[in-house]
Image (spheres, rainbow, N blue to C red):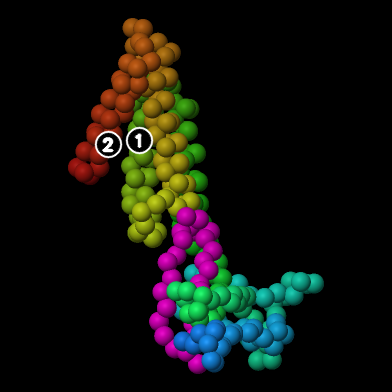
Amino acid sequence: RFEGEFFESLELQEFPFDEQKLSVSLAMNTRTTGLTPVNITLAPPEHLLATMNLDGFQLNHEYAISCETDESDGTLLVDHRGMPQAEITARLYEVGSNADRMFPSIELSIYLRRRPTYYMVNVCAPLAMMVPLAFVQYDVDPTLVSDRLSISLTLVLTVAAFKFAVSQMTPSIAYMTILDRYVMLNWLLIALVVLSAPAVAILDGKYSATPITIPALVGRTAAFAARRLVGLSADADDA
């Protein structure tokens, strides 16, 4: 029996749909060559006990342990104690500095799948409902740019606050996950809707009768949106 604390670096690019492979490697302190060579041999699968006490798994609410299933009907396989048989894989290999000093080793791995329901309900679903609300501005007269922006910019501030709240629920890592990309994409869609409000009025000749080039249009649109955003922020602070 072995007891100890083990650490594993998690790969979270697919968060919150990530799958993790947790491995433990054991090496014998006896060479595979010499006077008393030692090698590791795996027992046949039918004699290999690969069960886990799922009641003692502290992250059971967040991860699901991959278990063996019957290929015919998909039901979980259990041992003589009624415990599910975890899907544990074993790999034999040798470690050492040269051919005469190689030591037998075994790597045992178990697979975990994250339960994404919490993030789907608390992050993805609310954002999926916020973004369509930005398109409500197109029901407002194009000449009423301020009224249009009051709708979409309010959602920009809402999504910004929502992004801050989401960051408290996601891992602090140096790369973007699927969830980060999803949030940023929704934020970008709302930002494009915001910019379209003055752009449509300008191109339609209702906001400005003076012909305007595309770079000037982009600059004027960004400046108008920035002034409106600052105004909304000030109103929120006063409230």
Give the overall secondary structure of the magenta segment.
Answer: loop
Answer with left or right where residue 87 lies relative to residue 2: right
Q: Mark 1 points at which residue?
A: 153
Q: In the image, is 239 to the left or to the right of 170? A: left
Which residues are drawn in magenta?
A: 1-28
* Residue at x-position 42% and y-position 43%: 184
Taking the magenta stretch, the answer to whether it contains residue 10 is yes
> Could you say where residue 130 lies in the image, as x and y percent from the top left?
45, 44
In front here: 119 or 26?
A: 26
Q: In which quarter of the image is the C terminus?
A: top left
User: In which quadrant of the rendered view does residue 215 lie?
Assistant: top left
Q: What element carries label 2?
A: helix
Q: Residues within 10 Å of mark 2 (few under 14, many from 20)?
A: some
| Amino acid at the residue labelled 1 | Leu
Q: Residues within 10 Å of mark 1 (few under 14, many from 20)?
A: many
Residue shown at 47% from the left, 55% from the top? 13
Q: Height in image: 204 above or below 56? A: above
Please give the residue where the numbered disc 2 appears in the rendered image: 232
Q: What type is the residue that disc 2 sits on?
A: Leu
> Residue at image x 28%, y 25%?
223
Residue 84 is drawn in which quadrant?
A: bottom right
Q: Is residue 214 above or below residue 189?
A: above
Give the secondary structure at mark 1.
helix
Disc 2/disc 1 C-alpha distance (Å): 8 Å
Give the answer, above or below, for where 160 lies relative to 172.
above
For the residues bearing labels 2 and 1, Cβ distance under 8 angstroms: yes
Q: Which is more toward the observer, 66 or 210?
A: 66
Instruction: Decide whether residue 37 is among the magenta residues.
Output: no
Name the spot of residue 132 as percent of width and height, x first. 50, 39
Q: In front: 167, or 231? A: 167
